[in-house]
């Protein structure tokens, strides 16, 4: 660490100092969450964070990043996709993403069936969502009666929006 004023941030307090450690963990959890949101990353890789500021200065490296990820998971703001290697951070809930997608479809008068690959090619904020989450988002939209899920003849999932709602 170049600046000694901030060195305390990069050294986690001993776990036997529960309140200090919890406070340190909360602050770093906010940093990781904000990092994902600002960088528009839905999935972050522990190994990648080891070489990225501000995480590269963490004295306990991978262990600290995993603890921070665990804390986000405990708060239901993230889930481990690959055990302690790949973390899915939910800086917007799937319900919020469903609203974003519906608003976009409404604004752009999208009435034809939209496949997952169509949405991923739109260069919109939702285009970088993990592909496996779109079926769940489609279910949310269908439950909200904003359209219906359809399957093509080759079993690909699509969504037809009901823009009259």
Image (cartoon, grey):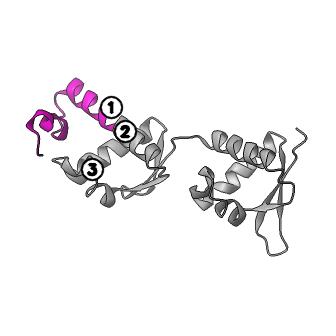
Q: Which mark is residue 71?
A: 2
Q: Nearer the viewer, mark 2 or mark 1?
A: 1
- Chief SS of the magenta region: helix
Residue 159 visible in image? yes
Secondary structure, mark 1, is helix
Task: Compute the Cα span from label 2 to label 1.
Answer: 8 Å
**Residue numbers of the magenta segment:** 2-29
Residue 73: which quarter of the image? top left
Tell whether position 71 is magenta: no
Mark 1, residue position: 26
**Which callout, 2 or 3, points at the residue further toward the start of the chain?**
3
- 92 shown above or below 46: above
Mark 3, residue position: 53
The crowding category of the residue bearing disc 2, from other C-alpha atoms within 10 Å (few below 14, some 14 to 19, many at least 20), is some
Secondary structure, mark 2, is helix
**Which callout, 3 or 1, points at the residue further toward the start of the chain?**
1
Residue 141: which quarter of the image? top right
* Residue 51 on image: x %, y %: 26, 58
Q: Which residue reaches farthest front?
A: 108
The crowding category of the residue bearing disc 3, from other C-alpha atoms within 10 Å (few below 14, some 14 to 19, many at least 20), is few
Q: Nearer the viewer, mark 2 or mark 3?
A: 3
């Amino acid at each position: 660490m170049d600046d000694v004023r901030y060195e305390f941030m990069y050294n986690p307090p001993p776990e036997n100092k529960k309140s200090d450690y919890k406070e340190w963990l909360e602050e770093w959890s906010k940093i990781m969450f904000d990092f994902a949101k600002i960088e528009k990353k839905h999935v972050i890789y522990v190994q990648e964070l080891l070489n990225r500021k501000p995480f590269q200065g963490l004295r306990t490296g991978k262990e600290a990043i995993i603890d921070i990820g665990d804390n986000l998971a405990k708060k239901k703001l993230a889930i481990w996709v690959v055990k302690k290697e790949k973390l899915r951070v939910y800086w917007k809930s799937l319900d919020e993403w469903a609203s974003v997608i519906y608003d976009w479809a409404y604004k752009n008068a999208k009435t034809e069936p939209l496949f997952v690959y169509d949405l991923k090619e739109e260069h919109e904020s939702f285009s970088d969502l993990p592909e496996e989450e779109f079926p769940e988002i489609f279910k949310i939209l269908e439950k909200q009666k904003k359209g219906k899920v359809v399957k093509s003849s080759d079993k690909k999932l699509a969504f037809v929006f009901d823009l009259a709602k």
